[in-house]
Amino acid sequence: MKNANAKRDNNFDILRLTLAIVVVFFHSALISNSPSLAWLPNVFSGHLAVEGFFSISGFLILASYERSKSLKDYFWRRAGRILPGYWLATIFCLAIAFSSGCFHVGRFLFANLTFANFLQPSIPGLWDTNPGTNIVDGALWTLKIEVMFYLVVPLIVWLCRKLRRDAVLWTLFALSIAYRIGMAKHPSLAVQLPGQLSFFMIGGLIHYHQKLFYKYGRWMMAVAAAMFVVHTFTGWYVLRPAAVAVLTLGAALLLPVVKGPARWGDFSYSTYVLHWPILQIVAAAGLFALHPWGALGLAFLMIAVGAVISWFLVEKPALDRVHAHAQRFKQPVPAVIPS
């Protein structure tokens, strides 16, 4: 079987970067409140991009857990991937607040450190006059769900090993869809866990059935595309999670490999966590009102610079330390203790 986790064999990095860019376009309309950019969410769906992220997470996080040598090793790897970039985004937001003379950041800091961003999404006095919203980093709400996925994966895998694996995953998939449909009148709750678990579960099923997916995946993608079209015209949500997840994982595993900027690093996470406050900075300067497209271009340049700095100075060194720790853990105990 092909190694789906080897970077040279898949499109995970470039796909995640593409999804992050889609989210940037989506949020630029909300934050700028510019009539010239108002059409962007109709073309660049942030909701669809987030669902793609969760589908990829289902595949990669279950694979990460299965590869881990212990529960501690698993959480160490997950923490090494998510926390450094998250902390950098939080520090960046605090630096913006302090430079703007806004010092009442205690509740915001506590909410971010506990992944409970919804408790205090704004900082008093910061961006109160921005045209769209004063939320400091509205993209971080998905990180709470991602962390919850990290926490429940050991339990899910334990259930899979005790019971019938596929039955467990499909049951969780069905329960997630039932929750999402049942909470349709409460959209802010519907998109929380377990509402997003259905995408994650299809990613997990594809991980466990990679041979089948490599063999029949293109046919599955054709069926998934038809399902998504039907969902689009009918609104039948039950078709959406499997369609989105299969198309996302198909693009990652089955399409020709595209390197792009991913050849130099994984810039998707930092693009995602930093783009919102950068868009807010550009909005606060009044640039979207002066020249919406020029402002958006400047924002993208700033996001790209921030993503590169984050990857090379924060995220990659942290991952290198995690990998170095794992390698030391793998070393055999010497037969003779050296003197």
Image (cartoon, grey):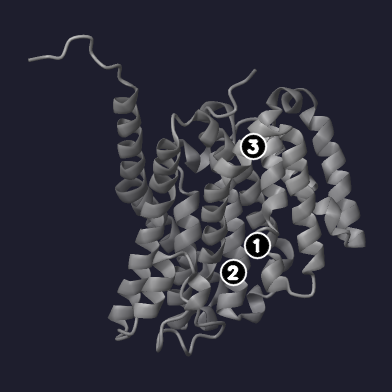
Q: Position of residue 105 (x, y in %)?
A: 35, 80
Location of residue 145 in the rendering, given as x and y in whole percent from the top left corner:
57, 58
Query: Does residue 17 appear to the left or right of 298 in the view shown?
Result: right
What is the crowding at mark 3: few (fewer than 14 residues within 10 Å), some, or many (at least 20)? many
How many residues crowd mark 1 within 10 Å: few (<14), some (14–19), many (20+)? many
Q: Are marks 2 and 1 in contact (CB under 8 Å)?
A: yes
Q: In the rendering, which numbered label is found on residue 46?
A: 1
Q: Residue at x 36, y 40 (%)?
A: 319
**Quadrant (top left/top right/bottom left/bottom right) for the N terminus:** top right
Per the model, the C-alpha gap separating discs 1 and 3 is 19 Å
* 216 displayed left or right of 55: right
Q: Which of pointers 1 and 3 lies earlier in the amino acid sequence? A: 1
User: In terms of secondary structure, where does tag 2 sit?
Assistant: helix
Q: Three-letter amino acid code at disc 2?
A: His
The kind of residue on which mark 3 rests is: Ala
The part of the image, by quadrant, that contains residue 148 is bottom right
Residue 137 visible to an observer of this rendering: yes
User: Of all residues shown, which one is farthest toward the left?
Assistant: 339
Q: Please tell me which residue lies in front, 312 or 142.
A: 142
Residue ID for mark 3? 252
Point 66% across, 33% down: residue: 162
Q: Say left or right for 42 vs 297.
A: right
The residue identified by callout 2 is 27
Disc 2/disc 3 C-alpha distance (Å): 24 Å
Q: Residue at x 30, y 31 (%)?
A: 324
Q: Position of residue 140 (x, y in %)?
A: 51, 64
Asked if residue 264 is positioned above or below residue 194 in the image, the reply reads: above
Task: Check the picture and name the quadrant holding the C terminus.
Answer: top left
Please state if 20 lies on the left or on the right of 215 as rendered: left
Report the amino acid beneath label 1: Gly
Front residue (pair 53, 329):
329
SS at badge 3:
helix
